[in-house]
Amino acid sequence: MQKEYICIHCPLSCDLTLTDDNGILSVTGNTCKRGEDYAKNEYRNPLRMLTTTLRLEQGDSKLLPVISSDMIPKEKLGECLDLLYSISVTAPVTSGDVVYKNILNTGVDILAAKTVVMQP
């Protein structure tokens, strides 16, 4: 089985081909070890940072940008977003504050990405 990827670890954006021969993985097209590692990780356990906005109450804006403290399994992103879209945060909020702890038991927190003061 073969899968095609474009490496995102450097500006070269290598076209990678990962071959799975009964559990033995090999990668071609990479110019460095990072490309090989990227393709293997993407095949076995794809992870993504989560960035979105949450509803903000009593703030000087209506939305609060947030980011995950670490990468989340790709297959859980939709469920994480559904959960986050169902909540709101109340100002004031400081950049770096944990607005949701251990989302879906991933061990990853959701952090405020902006400081927002209360509405005057």
Image (spheres, rainbow, N blue to C red):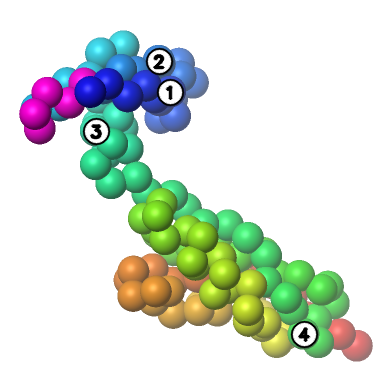
Relative side of 68 to 44, left or right: right
CA gap, disc 3 and disc 2: 14 Å
Asked whether, in this view, residue 52 is left or right of residue 32, the answer is: right
Q: Are discs 1 and 4 less than 8 Å apart at CB?
A: no
Answer whether labels 1 and 2 touch (C-beta < 8 Å): yes
Chief secondary structure of the magenta portion: strand
Q: Earlier in the sequence, mark 3 or mark 1?
A: 1
Q: Nearer the viewer, residue 89 or 96?
A: 89
N-term-proximal mark, 1 vs 2: 1
Mark 1 vs mark 4: which is more N-terminal? Answer: 1
- Asked whether the viewer can see residue 37, the reply is yes
**Which is closer to the viewer, label 3 or label 4?**
3
Residue depicted at 64% across the width and 72% down the height: 85
Most foreground residue, 32 or 105: 105
Task: Tell me which numbered mark, 4 or 2, is placed earlier along the sequence.
Answer: 2
Residue lying at 63% horizontally and 81% vertically, measured from the top left: 87
Q: Is residue 94 left or right of residue 73?
A: right
Percent position (x, y) of residue 2?
A: 27, 21
Residue with the mark numbered 2: 15
The part of the chain drawn in magenta is 19-23
What is the crowding at mark 3: few (fewer than 14 residues within 10 Å), some, or many (at least 20)?
A: some
In what element is the residue under mark 4?
Answer: strand
Instruction: Give the Cα separation between the discs numbered 4 and 2.
Output: 45 Å
Q: Are marks 3 and 2 in contact (CB under 8 Å)?
A: no
Q: What residue is shown with label 1?
A: 6
Which disc number belongs to residue 57? 4
Q: Quadrant of residue 103?
A: bottom left
Q: Judge depth for marks 1 and 4 and give the one in front.
A: 1
* Residue indicated by mark 3: 40
Q: Secondary structure at mark 1?
A: strand
The crowding category of the residue bearing disc 4, from other C-alpha atoms within 10 Å (few below 14, some 14 to 19, many at least 20), is some
